[in-house]
């Protein structure tokens, strides 16, 4: 069995298939998860769903994972090729389901794969993921017992649920880019069910991702989407990542829309129906976004980066909405509070159709000069050390300091963020200022500390 300890990450289990883990590991993980879920629920034959993305390795992994689960007594409902949000959807809507496992490499390259895991209606992270590793290492499994598996078609109930919510929307010209990922399994029928007729790019799920890398929050992956938007005169372009839990956007002119801008755009609409409520954003979001939320009657809360962490905070604060810079968007007002990018796309289209304006006309923010999220490759040890050194450099300073996730430094005319990625050997930085000169100054101030340590 291949099992690198590095695959047990903060939010999921993920690595290069047949290098960091193999099908034997998938079977052991199935047994470990069955053990965990039985101990938590006290059920001898818990009902579990398994979904998978379009990666070439996914079917073999699902087969081994299912074998491990059924060996320990689970009743497995196999959803087949679905999005990660549909896997989550099953935990809220399918009778007797007490957990789910989604086999997906998300937005990673084609040779990656992994597992996003839910216990009950909650995505596990941190210590609970490490608990699965411990069960495997200790071989502390529950006793063998007969389980079962069967195929389960969840699509009819998924389409029906959102047709009921949205009815028939006014069709506007827009483009979606499925990126040859799992979104292609659902987007056309979902959108057509509510009266929409999008232009669709790269709809066919293909684990080789032949047209571009499946991460719509990186500008170079949005080039074809931007070109199509301009070609057809669309109001918006919507891109999905490999498993369709993250969304990326371009405006009517083909310009990239940052994740925190989308957060503000959606928050404004949500707050119209939920005045005074809390809205959650992560530490990578601009100050302008938190100010905008407050200006529109919300209570902005800055929280740690990470889809599981933001989702958990949305639930604990009973917030109607939250999101993060990376394109994970959580609607908890009319939906279930998890990140479903095709659903988020429907909400965006609904807003644009109702308002009769484009994205830029509806979102007016103060002018700022900012970088995107900058990811600096380093080592697991160095990324932690660098953040600690930056913290030391500002220990006795007069700057405003936020240590909720890494260090965020507030200047009179902007801010800087330095944090260690929870999922990769990467240092994450972002800078913003109200002037071009200020952005250069703030960037240099931090880079002078960081660069000698890399």
Image: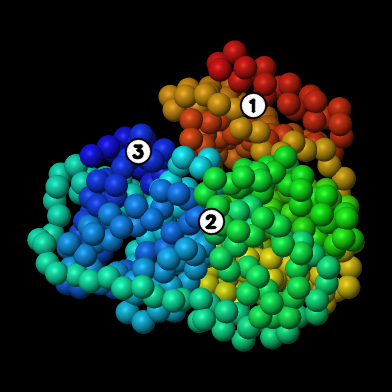
> Which residue reaches farthest left?
143
Assess disc 3: are there few (<14), some (14-19) or many (≥20) residues with their C-alpha within 10 Å of its C-alpha. some
> Which residue reaches farthest top?
452
Between 441 and 266, the one nearer to me in the picture: 266
Classify residue 237 as left or right of residue 230: left
45 w.r.t. 102: above or below: below
At a point 35% along the width and 38% down the height, the residue shown is 18
**Foreground label between 2 and 3:** 3
Give the numbered dot on residue 243.
2
At a point 50% along the width and 81% down the height, the residue shown is 157
Secondary element at tag 2: loop
438 w.r.t. 236: above or below: above
Assess disc 2: are there few (<14), some (14-19) or many (≥20) residues with their C-alpha within 10 Å of its C-alpha. many
Q: Which residue is mark 1?
A: 397
Task: Indicate the quadrant containing the N terminus: top left, top right, bottom left or bottom right.
Answer: top left
Report if the CB atoms under discs 1 and 2 are less than 8 Å apart: no
Give the numbered dot on residue 18.
3
- Residue 405 lies, in percent from the top left, at 53, 41
Give the quarter of the image for residue 322: bottom right
54 w.r.t. 170: above or below: above
**Foreground label between 3 and 1:** 3
At a point 71% along the width and 22% down the height, the residue shown is 445
């Amino acid at each position: 069995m291949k099992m690198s300890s590095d695959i047990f990450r903060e939010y999921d289990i993920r690595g290069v298939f047949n290098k960091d883990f193999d099908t034997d590991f998938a079977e052991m993980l199935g047994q470990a998860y069955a053990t965990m879920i039985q101990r938590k629920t006290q059920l001898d034959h818990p009902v579990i769903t398994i979904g998978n993305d379009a990666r070439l390795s996914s079917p073999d992994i699902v087969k081994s994972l299912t074998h491990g689960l059924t060996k320990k007594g689970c009743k497995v409902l196999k959803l087949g090729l679905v999005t990660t949000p549909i896997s989550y959807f099953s935990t809220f809507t399918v009778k007797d389901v007490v957990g789910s496992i989604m086999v997906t490499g998300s937005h990673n390259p084609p040779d990656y794969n992994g597992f996003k895991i839910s216990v009950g209606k909650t995505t596990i992270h941190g210590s609970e993921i490490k608990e699965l590793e411990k069960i495997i290492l200790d071989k502390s499994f529950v006793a063998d017992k007969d389980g079962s598996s069967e195929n389960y078609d969840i699509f009819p109930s998924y389409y029906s649920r959102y047709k009921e919510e949205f009815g028939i929307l006014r069709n506007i010209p827009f483009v979606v880019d499925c990126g040859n990922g799992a979104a292609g399994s659902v987007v056309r029928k979902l959108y057509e069910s509510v009266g929409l007729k999008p232009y669709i790019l790269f709809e066919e799920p293909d684990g080789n991702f032949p047209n571009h890398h499946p991460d719509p929050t990186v500008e170079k992956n949005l080039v074809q989407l931007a070109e199509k938007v301009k070609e057809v005169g669309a109001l918006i372009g919507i891109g999905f990542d490999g498993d369709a839990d993250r969304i990326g956007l371009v405006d009517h002119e083909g310009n990239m829309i940052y994740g925190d801008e989308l957060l503000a755009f959606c928050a404004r609409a949500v707050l119209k129906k939920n005045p005074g409520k809390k809205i959650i954003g992560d530490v990578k979001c601009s100050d302008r976004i938190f100010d905008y939320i407050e200006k529109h009657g919300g209570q902005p809360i800055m929280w740690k980066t990470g889809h599981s962490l933001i989702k958990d905070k949305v639930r604990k604060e009973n917030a109607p909405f939250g999101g993060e810079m990376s394109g994970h968007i959580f609607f908890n007002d009319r939906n279930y509070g998890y990140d479903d990018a095709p659903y988020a796309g429907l909400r965006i289209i609904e807003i644009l159709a109702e308002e009769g304006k484009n994205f830029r006309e509806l979102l007016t923010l103060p002018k700022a000069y900012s970088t995107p999220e900058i990811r600096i490759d380093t080592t697991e040890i160095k990324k932690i050390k660098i953040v600690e050194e930056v913290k030391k450099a500002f220990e006795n300073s007069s700057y405003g300091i936020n240590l909720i996730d890494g260090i965020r430094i507030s200047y009179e005319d902007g801010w800087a963020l330095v944090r260690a990625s929870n999922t990769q050997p990467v240092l994450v930085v972002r800078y913003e200022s109200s002037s071009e000169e200020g952005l250069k100054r703030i960037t240099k101030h931090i880079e002078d500390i960081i660069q000698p340590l890399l």
